[in-house]
Image (cartoon, rainbow, N blue to C red):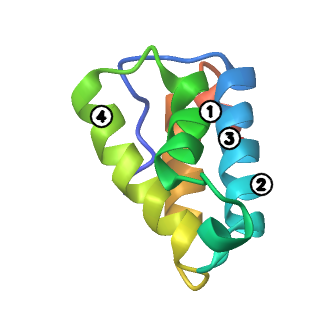
Amino acid sequence: MTTTPHPTRLDRANTGAALYRVAICAFTYHADKHLDEPGYQLAEDLDWCLAPLAALPITELAVLRNNIATLITTPTADRQAFIRALATLSDDASEGL
């Protein structure tokens, strides 16, 4: 992923909220979570994580949704690319996240 500025700029609070939500979901996820928490669905976590980014185009949200699903369910996933991608969405992208 590159760190060039994104045409749709989001408030830094929104990108920070998305990062926070993804981190919480990744830290609390485990393979048997649906057994420990009846009714748990990954889709609900994904919706929550993406809510601060709702201003983005639907196609971009779909890509982010897939990436976030991997970040949540795969403990060894590289999170640095996601952090850089969020930084490019911020209205103060030159400062990073």
Which residue occupies 54% across, 41% down? 44
Question: Does the residue at mark 2 contact the one at mark 3 (Cβ under 8 Å)?
Answer: no
Question: Does the residue at mark 4 contact the one at mark 3 (Cβ under 8 Å)?
Answer: no
Q: Nearer the viewer, residue 93 or 35?
A: 35
**Mark 4 closeness class: few <14, some 14–19, many ≥20 residues within 10 Å:** few
Mark 1 is on which residue type? Ser
Which residue occupies 35% across, 34% down? 61
Question: Does the residue at mark 3 contact the one at mark 1 (Cβ under 8 Å)?
Answer: yes
Which circle's residue, 2 or 3, is located before the other in the chain?
2
Mark 2 is on which residue type? Ile
Q: Nearer the viewer, mark 3 or mark 1?
A: 3
Mark 4 is on which residue type? Glu
**Mark 2 closeness class: few <14, some 14–19, many ≥20 residues within 10 Å:** some
Is 90 left or right of 58, judged from the image as shown? right
Which residue occupies 60% across, 52% down? 39
In this view, 26 is above or below 65: below
Determine whether the residue tagged by mark 2 lies in a helix, strand or loop: helix
In this view, 3 is above or below 81: above
In this view, 90 is above or below 2: above
Determine whether the residue tagged by mark 1 lies in a helix, strand or loop: helix
Kindly identify which numbered label has been placed on residue 24.
2
Q: Nearer the viewer, mark 4 or mark 3?
A: 4
- Residue beneath label 3, please? 96
In this view, 54 is above or below 43: above
Quadrant holding the C terminus: top right
- Residue beneath label 1, please? 94
Is 36 left or right of 62, judged from the image as shown? right
- Residue beneath label 4, please? 60
Determine whether the residue tagged by mark 4 lies in a helix, strand or loop: helix
Quadrant holding the N terminus: bottom left
